[in-house]
Image (spheres, rainbow, N blue to C red):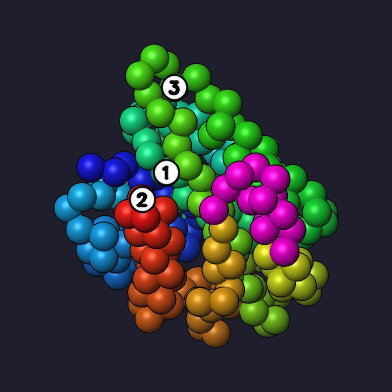
Amino acid sequence: MFNILCFGDSNTFGTNPKGGRHSWNVRWPGRLQQLLGKEYYIIEEGMGGRTTVWDDPLEPNRCGLSALPVALQSHKPLDMVILSLGTNDCKAHFHATPRIIAKGMECLCKEVRSFDYGPSYPVPKILIISPIHILEDVEHSPFASFDKTSPEKSRLLAPLYRNVASEQDCLFLDGSTVAKASPIDQLHMDKDNHRALAEAVADIVKTYFEA
């Protein structure tokens, strides 16, 4: 059995743009489990508001770099870690440029690769998923931390993340090429887009492990 950790934010958690949380068989990690079957074990580790490396005074305990070592320790052995973060780094109060956000993703990759898993445990392969695009009207959404600069930042992340993936020997998926946010809340995916993302991830995973 291949053990895969999905480490992400609210779109990994499965926040429903209509409110609440999508059910397990709708959100993309659950769909991924169904697509891959019993030879794979998909571990969900999504949290709304999670960033790559930032501590958020408005939403405490959301720093990905702080949470990642705990997840790696508690879920090992791991064959793959999927990192799907960056949307919340686009919040106005972080003042982070796309290049800085990409450096945050690089820090997460280095943590996965350098973590002390202990004897007999493998170093997992990393798949980076760059975020879906934040929609233009997000500054008028209920999410006050996003402003008019946030959508453009999200659109500029994919090529920078692709470079990080190349430099860190990671797999890569541009999430915005297969899925998009709902116009209901500008940030989160509906069930059809969760399905589309899961299908794209499944293709990459199968290609890597079953080649």
Asked if one can make out residue 115 in the rendered structure from this viewpoint, the answer is yes
Residue at disc 2, secondary structure: helix
Q: Dot 3 lies on which element?
A: loop
Asked if residue 194 is positioned above or below residue 103 in the image, the reply reads below
Q: In screen coordinates, is 164 left or right of 203?
A: right
Q: Is residue 56 above or below residue 156?
A: above
Residue 209 bears which disc, if any? 2
* Label 2 or label 3, whichever comes before in sequence order: 3
Which residue is disc 1 drawn over? 80
Q: Position of residue 124 (x, y in %)?
A: 45, 37
Report the amino acid beneath label 1.
Met
* Number of other residues with Cα within 10 Å of mark 2, as a class: few under 14, some 14 to 19, many 20 or more: few
Q: Earlier in the sequence, mark 2 or mark 1?
A: 1
Residue under pointer 3? 117
Instruction: Looking at the picture, tell me which residue is in the foreground, 83 or 136.
Output: 83
Label number found at residue 127: none
Q: Amino acid at mark 2?
A: Phe
Q: Residue at x 50, y 29 (%)?
A: 69
Mark 2 touches mark 3? (CB < 8 Å):
no
Q: Earlier in the sequence, mark 1 or mark 3?
A: 1
**Residue at x-position 50% and y-position 71%:** 188
Q: Position of residue 170 (x, y in %)?
A: 57, 48
Instruction: Give how far apart the Cα atoms at labels 1 and 3 are.
Output: 13 Å
Specify start and end residues of the magenta stretch as a single range.
159-171
The amino acid sitting under disc 3 is Tyr
Q: CA distance from mark 2 to mark 1?
A: 10 Å
